[in-house]
Image: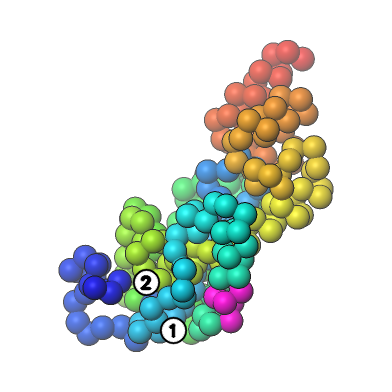
Amino acid sequence: MNWWDRLPLEIREPPRPQFVIGSDEVGTGALAGPFVVTAVVYPFTWRGLPGLQDSKKFKKPKEKQFRRDLAEEVYKTALTFNQQYVTVEEIDRKGMYPMLLRAHHRAIQACLSLFPKALVIVDGNFSFHRNGGVKYHSIVQADGRVPAVSAASVLGKVERDWWMGSYAAGVYPVYGFANHLGYGSPEHFRALEQYGPCEIHRKSYGPIKRLMRKLEHVG
């Protein structure tokens, strides 16, 4: 059974599409840094790359290197792709969920401008309005079920990891971003207790809000 046969029946109504756009996000649960939405386009007949899967499944050092290698192959083999960075300022001012929907829409529309009749599949459980006659199909765990979404997942993960592990870690070295990539690890919380939040921490997120109130009270 291929990936197409495992999709809900309402998506598999004929005719079969010629192209598939897969869209996924990474970094929405982090306490610092941007999140990234990636959309990629592949032919409908594309079955993926050897070892391609949900980017979160690559955990060991050798697996993470393999994920980087896969990302390079996606760069080379995708018909096109688009990545949308959502900044900390946008997250704090407009909210994570509205900006997530907007970023998916922007990335997908950039791909649809070149492949207007592509099937659109988004990882997650979202309610999208029909956009210009094109329906976005939101499927839970699509990043492990649909090759184009898996490709978007890997490409986005490698991109954001690079930003947090290189740029953010270089500008804000005391927080250990290269290790935890902005997520809520014990190391990260210890640094926050010692130094307080920096410019790229999401002030609208509960743990950062509580820490800021605590620091204000102590001060």
Mark 2 residue type: Val
Residue 29 picture location, percent across and down: 52, 43
Q: Which residue is drawn at 53% across and 82% down?
A: 77
Magenta span includes 74: yes
Q: In which quarter of the image is residue 162?
A: bottom right
Magenta span includes 164: no
Q: How far apart are marks 1 and 2 (CA)?
A: 10 Å
Q: Is residue 99 above or below residue 50?
A: above
Q: Is residue 28 visible?
A: yes
Q: Dominant secondary structure of the magenta stretch?
A: helix
Q: Residue at x 57, y 77 (%)?
A: 73
Question: For the residue labelled by badge 1, is the local secondary structure a helix, a strand or a loop?
Answer: loop
Give the labeled residue for mark 2: 120
Q: Is residue 1 left or right of residue 162?
A: left
Q: How crowded is mark 1: few (under 14 residues within 10 Å), some or many (20 or more)?
A: some
Which numbered disc covers residue 115? 1
Q: In this view, does 168 lie above or below 20?
A: above
Q: In this view, does 219 lie to the left or right of 187?
A: right
